[in-house]
């Protein structure tokens, strides 16, 4: 079955000899015990106590894993804890109150430092204010903020009073915000007046106002004044200024609410294979244990480190590895508001240099951009503080891997290529940097205690190096507990295809294709469902398609990912217009505008290709896979079984005739 589906066309086998982790790194690594894989295997699931031990529990748990209601697994049952206590109070109690918790780097060069004590004070005041506003345990609070300190503060304040947060990426549209607030029945919103985009003041409050108009429920809103005089704003009914709101509770503290290990810590909406985003539910105990453990074992974070995950907290990577993981371990976490190229292309390296960052974690899309810009930018800075580098979000092929290793890590830092998902909550596949060899291009083995396998269409395991579907054959603590939209959708999306309930076999379907080599190293080949990973943002083709077909004059649309010359995934939209409308620049513009308005600029199609019809099977199914091959300039197989084979040639002419090809 290898590559019959076109999987892995961009993914050659890892090249070059495996590299051992440098001795200097191993000497100081958090986890160096080679027996750990076997030990976790033999002692499963009790092995996961090692993760739970990194936390402070109010009530100890009595059972590590309850599997009776699989796939609704329950971890560390009977235990109670509070995530904000684990990220704050316990570090104060350990005498580390003056230790830096957050180093914030603003877009305009502003800098702020929060000690654990500062963070504790502000989180408590906000928690007291939220409670006084009426936020109770289990009330979902939506947070729609850019990368400013108030974002993690709001998350921790919610966690303190047992209110699940639902963070919506600040770049998403007002419509996307409204859909998520509606789905979560959320009556509280923390947002801001605006933020700077490449130096300009951008009005976030206007987006929030539009979303509120679309909602049936009354929404209590708290507005952070990020821009001051650069963007004056007026507060309306049910709106409060963040500073006034919090300062009314100056100096107050709130007892952290003990939460059951299985209680929801947060909700995170992510794109699935339908137009409706999925509300992934994460637990308090299992999630926090898993993110703390992987921050310790994979990212090698130590309390005295300055650690930087250059992601956005609006997505899962930022939740797990800017906020909860590093703060649970009591380290210093860097938070950067800006982009890598503003005010210049050396910006990130300047931050690494000035803060003496020890561990740096980013996405391949950024690494490919650094490579394109050239090594002169990092060369201008002292990066010798770096000890470990990480990659997440997309496959990193061996060339950018080597560039990262050489020009950022000076060949002295191991690289962890970490595979995981919103649904897995925390890193699931990666080398352990103090133990395992690295194979550039392959993520690594499944973590100790997890079981990743590759199967074919019928769910049978394939041989080494053969492509197939990546499944997880054992539960893990950070796993999503359900979808907020319902248990049925949870089972249908992840647990139906490769499970066999009669045999009590529950295999989680990741939606990714992969290969596993004879050493157990996993190479990820990309999504096999209708999800596109573009510049590290996870988007649903159906969501984009429905934004396109909502434009007047559009009949049908199909959206695919195209890998460009630098292996970036771009969005290509194939569109046919209805009988009354000829394709023209106005429709093209309306399409792009509507995608931006419905989802956000991150979903903007790179190319809109008009075609009289979309290629379809005889039963009328749009051939997306074929359209993807066309966009990627692949050899096409036999298309004679299509209802309208002649259309394929027309589309190819349209694309390659226009200046759609890179360079
Ligand atoms: C992809 C982000 C290759 C994958 C944490 C997955 C990766 C999706 C890697 C989840 C990696 C993540 N190598 N592909 N190291 N890490 N992916 O939910 O397709 O935003 O299914 O979570 O990103 O994206 P999500």
Image (tube, rainbow, N blue to C red):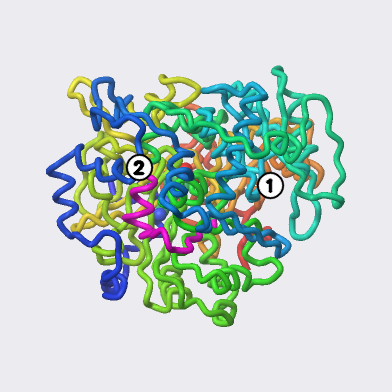
Q: Is residue 568 magenta?
A: no
Q: What residue lies at 26% left-to-right and 73% top-to-bottom?
A: 17
**Rendering coords of residue 553 (x, y %):** 76, 32
316 is higher (above) or lower (below) than 299: above
Numbered range of the magenta stretch: 289-310
Q: Mark 1 points at which residue?
A: 601
- Mark 2–mark 1 Cα distance, whole angstroms, equals 39 Å
Q: Which of 135 and 275 is in front in this view?
A: 135
Q: What residue lies at 57% left-to-right and 30% top-to-bottom?
A: 275
Q: Which of 135 and 506 is in front in this view?
A: 135
Q: Work out which quarter of the rendered image holds the C terminus and state it.
A: bottom right
187 is higher (above) or lower (below) than 519: above
Q: What residue lies at 62% left-to-right and 35% top-to-bottom?
A: 252
Judge left or right: residue 102 versus residue 5.
Answer: right
Dot 2: few (<14), some (14–19), or many (≥20) neighbours within 10 Å?
A: many
Q: Quadrant of residue 14?
A: bottom left
SS under mark 1: helix
């Amino acid at each position: 079955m290898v590559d019959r589906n076109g999987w892995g066309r961009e993914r050659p086998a890892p090249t070059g000899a495996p590299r051992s982790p440098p001795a200097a790194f191993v000497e100081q690594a958090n986890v160096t015990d080679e027996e750990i894989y076997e030990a976790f295997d033999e002692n499963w699931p009790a092995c996961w106590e090692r993760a739970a031990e990194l936390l402070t529990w109010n009530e100890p748990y009595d059972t590590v894993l309850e599997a009776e209601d699989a796939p609704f697994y329950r971890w560390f049952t009977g235990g109670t804890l509070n995530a904000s206590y684990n990220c704050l109070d316990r570090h104060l109690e350990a005498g580390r109150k003056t230790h830096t918790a957050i180093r914030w780097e603003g877009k305009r060069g502003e800098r702020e430092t929060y000690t654990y004590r500062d963070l504790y004070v502000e989180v408590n005041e906000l928690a007291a204010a939220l409670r006084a506003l009426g936020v109770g345990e289990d009330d979902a609070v939506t947070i729609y903020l850019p990368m400013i300190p108030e974002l993690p503060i709001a998350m921790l304040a919610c966690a303190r009073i047992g209110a699940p947060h639902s963070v919506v990426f600040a770049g998403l549209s007002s419509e996307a915000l409204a859909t998520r607030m509606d789905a979560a029945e959320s009556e509280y919103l923390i947002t801001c007046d605006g933020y700077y985009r490449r130096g300009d003041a951008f009005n976030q409050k206007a987006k929030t106002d539009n979303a509120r108009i679309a909602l049936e429920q009354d929404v209590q809103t708290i507005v952070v004044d990020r821009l001051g005089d650069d963007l004056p704003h007026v507060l309306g009914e049910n709106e409060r200024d963040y500073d006034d709101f919090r300062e009314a509770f100056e100096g107050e503290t709130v007892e952290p609410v003990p939460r059951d290990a299985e209680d929801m810590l947060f909700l995170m909406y992510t794109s699935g294979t339908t137009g409706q985003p999925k509300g992934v539910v994460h637990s308090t105990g299992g999630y926090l244990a898993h993110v703390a453990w992987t921050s310790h074992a994979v990212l090698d974070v130590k309390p005295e480190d300055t650690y930087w995950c250059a992601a956005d907290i609006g997505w899962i990577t930022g939740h797990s590895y800017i906020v909860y993981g590093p703060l649970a371990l009591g380290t210093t976490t860097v938070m950067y508001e800006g982009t890598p190229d503003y005010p210049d292309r050396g910006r990130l390296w300047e931050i690494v240099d000035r803060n003496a960052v020890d561990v740096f974690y980013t996405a391949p899309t950024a690494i490919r951009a650094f490579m394109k810009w050239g090594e002169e930018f990092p060369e201008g800075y002292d990066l010798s503080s770096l000890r470990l580098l990480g990659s997440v979000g997309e496959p990193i092929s061996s060339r950018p891997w080597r560039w990262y290793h050489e020009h950022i890590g000076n060949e002295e830092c191991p690289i962890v290529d970490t595979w995981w998902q919103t649904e897995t909550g925390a890193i699931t596949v990666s080398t352990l940097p103090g133990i395992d060899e690295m194979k550039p291009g392959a993520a690594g083995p499944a973590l100790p205690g997890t079981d990743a396998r590759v199967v074919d269409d019928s769910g049978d395991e394939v041989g080494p190096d053969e492509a197939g579907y990546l499944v997880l054959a054992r539960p893990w603590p950070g796993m999503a507990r359900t979808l907020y939209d319902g248990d049925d959708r949870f089972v249908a999306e992840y647990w139906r295809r490769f499970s066999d309930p009669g045999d009590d076999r529950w295999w989680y379907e990741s939606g990714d294709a992969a290969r596993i080599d004879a050493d157990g190293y996993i190479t990820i080949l990309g999504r096999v469902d209708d999800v596109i990973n573009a510049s590290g943002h996870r988007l649903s083709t159906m969501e984009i398609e429905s934004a396109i077909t909502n434009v007047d004059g559009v009949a049908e649309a199909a959206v695919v990912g195209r890998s460009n010359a630098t292996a970036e995934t771009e969005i290509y939209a194939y569109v046919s217009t209805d009988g009354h409308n000829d394709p023209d620049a106005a429709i093209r513009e309306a399409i792009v505008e509507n995608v931006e308005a419905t989802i956000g600029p991150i979903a903007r199609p790179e190319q809109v290709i008009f075609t009289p019809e979309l290629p379809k099977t005889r039963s009328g199914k749009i051939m997306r896979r074929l359209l993807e091959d066309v966009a990627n300039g692949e050899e096409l197989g036999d298309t004679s079984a299509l209802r309208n084979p002649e259309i394929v040639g027309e589309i190819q002419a349209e694309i390659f005739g226009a200046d759609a090809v890179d360079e």
